[in-house]
Amino acid sequence: MFLSVFDMFKVGVGPSSSHTMGPMVAAGRFLDLLRASPFHATGLRASLHGSLAFTGVGHATDRATILGLAGFLPETYDAKAAEAALIQIKASKSVTPEGLPLLKFDPATDMVFDYDTQLTGHPNGMILMATDAQGDVVLKETYYSIGGGFVVTEAEQAMEPVLDARDASRPYPFETANMMLDMAAASGKSIAELKRTNELSHMGPAEFDAKLAQIWEAMNACIDRGLETGGILPGGLNVKRRAQDIHQSLQAEAGLNLTAPHTINDWMCVYAMAVNEENAAGGQVVTAPTNGAAGVVPAVGRYWLDHVPGASISRIPEYLLTASAIGGLIKHNASISGAECGCQAEIGSASAMAAAGLCAVLGGTPMQVENAAEIALEHHLGMTCDPVKGLVQVPCIERNGLGAIKAVSAASLSMRGNGTHLVPLDNCIETMRQTGADMNDLYKETSLGGLAVNIPNC
């Protein structure tokens, strides 16, 4: 299945692509289904299952579902309008989405966290229903939020993958890293050039370039907002935002002759932490490939621009295209969902993407790029998803910083060789998939194990 760079990098709202963006998108799809339905509905209901239930409050799943049923979408999300809408909905116990009549919806009773019923299609499941005046269900659909803001219905999840028009028309239809390397060798193109050629098979170059520039602008703006904002993150853990203070300290040290070389790691970390503090606060972020891992790719790109001699903003498209090619391979052949494969699927995937992108703009060959991605992913294998109190804060924010450091190290190591290595990226991706399948559900975004149950008073 063709995955565009704009599938991997989507502008949305924090704190979670699976638990916030996905449910909001699912609710929007259900409203479209209701608009096309012959049934006359007067009310709505929602039930959240699996990981969406266990960590739903900490990830704002309930809030996202309510707003989605009111007509809000991640890409056009307005925080002030959303706050006003939530107050109105809770007071009126109803929603009024565009193109539909007033629909009864009391968040206190019509939103159910079902901790006992696990839906079979995916750990992130939800059921949306429309009811008539007697309270009988007249329309019902099951949705799965499968990571990175992607949503499928129960029927779609059960279907075999099918090729769409974009698959049939793309000149370089690689679905594995090995295929990608073979096509690069045969064509003489870089991985970014293969990806761009595929993208331009269904979008004009001017539109494509403008949209890709907007993605980087949103990433960069998110870093800047995070570096400029202090305070306490919401959710009850009283986690202090640290990026602002760390950045100010680093700026004060800039130019000092006695600064330790390892201080560069702090720059990588602070860029990533800035993004994920914004995400934890419910701000606008770009999935890369998810919200929980949104800081790694922007941080490594910003590190390259700000600290590496010869870096140029004109090559950021090459960075993003290469990163998205690797992210698409991981999603297609394994997972980018923390609820499905743990944090290896989120931070591990993001680190592999960033490592590949950095290697490319440093002048790496396709083989070195593939090697960089493999090194970064290999050293995240087995990482569990265990957010304390179900919030995308601890350990998530710092993990983005360490994921960025690993990405830079992986790119640097790969550039020291010729791209030949023992473990192919395809095999590493398959290992991640198998590891995720074997991983206990306690460590897959349920907050029932790991750090989530070993921090006092949380």
Image: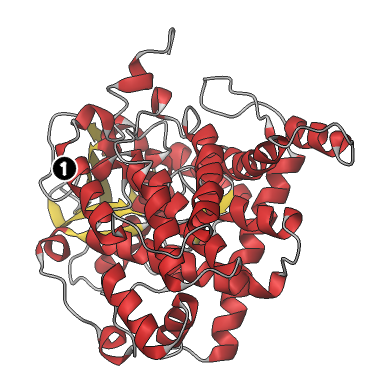
Q: Is residue 106 visible?
A: no
Is the C terminus in the top left, top right, bottom left or bottom right quadrant? top left
Q: Secondary structure at mark 1?
A: helix
Left or right of 291? Residue 335 is: left
Residue under the point 33% across and 85% down: 172
Rendered position, 98 above or below 338 = below
Left or right of 440? Residue 422 is: right
Colour convention of the picture: secondary structure
Q: Is residue 399 visible?
A: yes
Picture coordinates of residue 344, whole percent (x, y): 34, 42
Mark 1 crowd level (few <14, some 14–19, many ≥20, 10 Å Cα): some
Left or right of 425? Residue 417 is: right
Residue under the point 37% across and 13% down: 454
Residue under the point 60% across and 53% down: 300
Given residues 404 and 292, the one toward you in this image is 404
Picture coordinates of residue 385, whole percent (x, y): 34, 34
User: Count the marks: how many?
Assistant: 1
Given residues 158 and 183, the one toward you in this image is 183
Is the N terminus in the top left, top right, bottom left or bottom right quadrant? bottom left
Q: Amino acid at mark 1?
A: Ala
Rendered position, 375 above or below 458 = below
Rendered position, 373 above or below 448 = below
Picture coordinates of residue 43, whole percent (x, y): 27, 50
Kindly indicate the quadrant of the structure image that contains residue 76: bottom right
Left or right of 284? Residue 96 is: left
Kindly indicate the quadrant of the structure image that contains residue 163: bottom left
Picture coordinates of residue 21, whole percent (x, y): 41, 52
Residue under the point 72% across and 66% down: 311
Furthest residue to the top? 456
Residue matched to label 1: 437
